[in-house]
Image (spheres, helix red, strand yellow):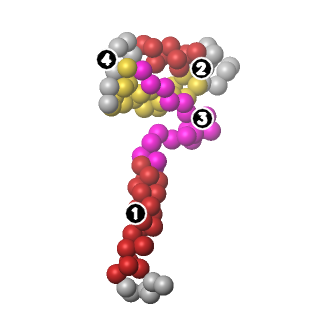
Amino acid sequence: MTRPGSPLFRLRRLPFAACALTLIAGLAACSSGPPLFLSDGRPTIQVQCPASGDRDSCAQQARARCAGAGYDTVATSTESGNYTLVFACRKAQ
C-alpha cells in the first residue's frame, strides 16, 4: 500500500494533475472564441475557406446559410492557411 507523502504516492498523482491542467487550458482556449450569440439574441455562425483561395466562398456560404436575409460580419481571421468568417444572419423583414 502506498502512503501519502511517499515518492510513489506523489508519482501516482502526476497523471491527475496533468489531466487537470489540460482541462483548464482547454477551457481557457474556449473563452477566446467568437460569441455564440450577439447582444440582440441572434446566433453566430462560423465558416472557413482556404486563405490562399477565393474568400468569396466564405461569403457564399454565409449567404446560403442566411437564405437571402443577408448577414452581418462579426469577426474575420486568417490562421494556419484558413480564412474564418463569423457572422450572424439578419432578421427577415
Q: Is residue 53 magenta?
A: no
Q: What label sits on residue 52 in the rendered view? A: 4
Residue drawn 35% across the image and 14% down it: 53
Q: Which residue is mark 1?
A: 18
Is there any visible trace of residue 42 in the rendered image? yes
Q: CA distance from mark 2 to mark 3?
A: 12 Å
**Mark 4: amino acid:** Ser
Is there any visible trace of residue 24 in the rendered image? no
Mark 2 Cα-neighbour bin, 10 Å: few <14, some 14–19, many ≥20: some
- Please provide percent x and percent y for residue 15: 42, 65
Instruction: Classify 44 as above or below 93.
Output: below
Please state the extent of the stretch shown in magenta in the rendering: 30-49
- Please provide percent x and percent y for residue 65: 59, 20
- Which of marks 1 and 3 precedes in the sequence? 1
Mark 3 Cα-neighbour bin, 10 Å: few <14, some 14–19, many ≥20: few
- Which of marks 2 and 1 precedes in the sequence? 1
- Which of marks 4 and 3 precedes in the sequence? 3
User: Which secondary structure lies at badge 1?
Assistant: helix
83 vs 67, left or right, is left
Q: CA distance from mark 1 to mark 2?
A: 40 Å
What type of secondary structure mainly makes up the magenta span? loop
